[in-house]
Image (cartoon, helix red, strand yellow):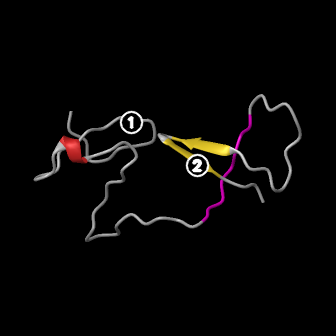
């Protein structure tokens, strides 16, 4: 089914001319390079829910955050 928009939780696929599926890797970001291209972020603010943690969490806690297919070391401030 063709979609004009994907929402959180949707699984989508698409083709890109002149790009082989072998050139793409998990975690790559797709965007329009001529119209508001995706950018990296040095830091961000997140609302986090911690489940089944055995101790107390305070400033300086450094967990590994799993976000979609990425595993990112972070630091709580």
Q: Residues within 10 Å of mark 1 (few under 14, many from 20)?
A: few
How far apart marks 1 and 2 lie (CA) works out to 23 Å
Q: Main secondary structure of the magenta part?
A: loop
Residue at the (40%, 46%) spot, across then down: 27
Can you tell which quarter of the image residue 13 is in?
Answer: top left
- The residue where tag 1 is placed is 10
- The residue where tag 2 is placed is 72
The residue lying furthest to the top in this view is 52
Please name whichever residue, 9 or 64, is drawn nearer the observer in this view of the structure.
Answer: 64
For the C terminus, which image quadrant? bottom right
Magenta span of residues: 43-50
Label drawn at residue 65: none
- On the rendered structure, is 28 left or right of 42? left
- On the rendered structure, is 27 left or right of 12? right
Residue at the (27%, 46%) spot, across then down: 24
Can you tell which quarter of the image residue 7 is in?
Answer: top left
Residue 5 rendering spot, x and y as whole percentages: 32, 47
For the N terminus, which image quadrant? top left
Please name whichever residue, 54 or 15, is drawn nearer the observer in this view of the structure.
Answer: 54
Q: Is label 1 in a helix, a strand or a loop?
A: loop
Residue 73 rendering spot, x and y as whole percentages: 63, 50
Q: Is label 2 in a helix, a strand or a loop?
A: strand
């Amino acid at each position: 089914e063709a979609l004009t928009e994907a929402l959180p939780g949707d699984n989508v696929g698409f083709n890109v001319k002149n790009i082989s599926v072998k050139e793409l890797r998990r975690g790559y970001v797709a965007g329009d390079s001529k119209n508001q291209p995706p950018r990296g972020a040095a830091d961000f603010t997140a609302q986090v829910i911690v489940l089944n943690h055995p101790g107390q969490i305070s400033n300086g806690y450094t967990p590994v955050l799993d976000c979609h297919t990425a595993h990112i070391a972070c630091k709580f401030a």
